[in-house]
Image (spheres, rainbow, N blue to C red):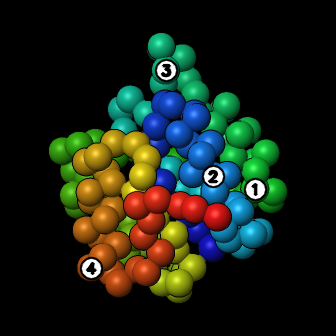
Amino acid sequence: MQLIISGNPNLGAIRNVIYLASKHYQGKIRKVLFIDNETSLQKDGLSVEGQRNEMVRSYIEDVTIESIPVKRENLHEKIPKLLSEKLQVYKRSEIVIDLTNGDKFITSALYASGSLSQIDNLFFRLSC
């Protein structure tokens, strides 16, 4: 399974999503894809990507982590294309999209693209 999540410099918010997704899917998540904007990889001028990746790996073993940068001007084109590419590799049931976290421009594009692609695992909130 692949978890797609909007990037966020607030690692506490990311931790909540990763923790709950790891509990809910119990070892099935093999890849976490962050869709990042210009501000989601830095906090107070310092990169948070390394800390974020370490934190993800502390909850999900043997996970592949990928970061895709998007700009607000073209995310409405890039996110549907990205999701289309993922659907060539993963079944719809193997894609989980978290909508609780990060940039609302990104999450709204994820919601629209996921809905039109008939992905069932769109989460407004994760619970165990």
Image check: 78 left or right of 56? left
Q: Mark 4 — residue?
A: 116
- Disc 2/disc 1 C-alpha distance (Å): 8 Å
Q: Residue at x 58, y 68 (%)?
A: 2
Please tell me whether mark 3 sits on a helix, a strand or a loop: strand
Residues at marks 2 and 3, CA–CA distance in whole angstroms:
19 Å
Q: Which residue is mark 3?
A: 43
Q: Amino acid at mark 4?
A: Leu
**What is the crowding at mark 2: few (fewer than 14 residues within 10 Å), some, or many (at least 20)?**
many
The residue pinned by badge 1 equals 60
Which residue carries the number 2 mark?
18
Where's residue 107, x and y in %?
Answer: 33, 54
Asked if disc 2 and disc 1 are in contact, CB closer than 8 Å, the reply is: yes
21 to 101, vertically: above or below: below
Task: Give the amino acid type for the residue marked by disc 1 in the picture.
Answer: Ile
Q: Nearer the viewer, residue 75 or 25?
A: 25
Q: Residue furthest left?
A: 73
In the structure shown, which secondary structural element does the residue marked by tag 4 occupy?
helix
- Asked whether disc 2 touches disc 3, contact meaning CB atoms under 8 Å apart, the reply is no
Q: Which is more foreground, mark 2 or mark 3?
A: 2
Q: CA distance from mark 1 to mark 3?
A: 24 Å
Viewer-side residue, 98 vs 24:
24
Q: Residue at x 71, y 63 (%)?
A: 23
Please state if 73 lies on the left or on the right of 94 as rendered: left
Q: Residues within 10 Å of mark 3 (few under 14, many from 20)?
A: some
Q: Earlier in the sequence, mark 3 or mark 4?
A: 3
Callout 3, which amino acid?
Lys
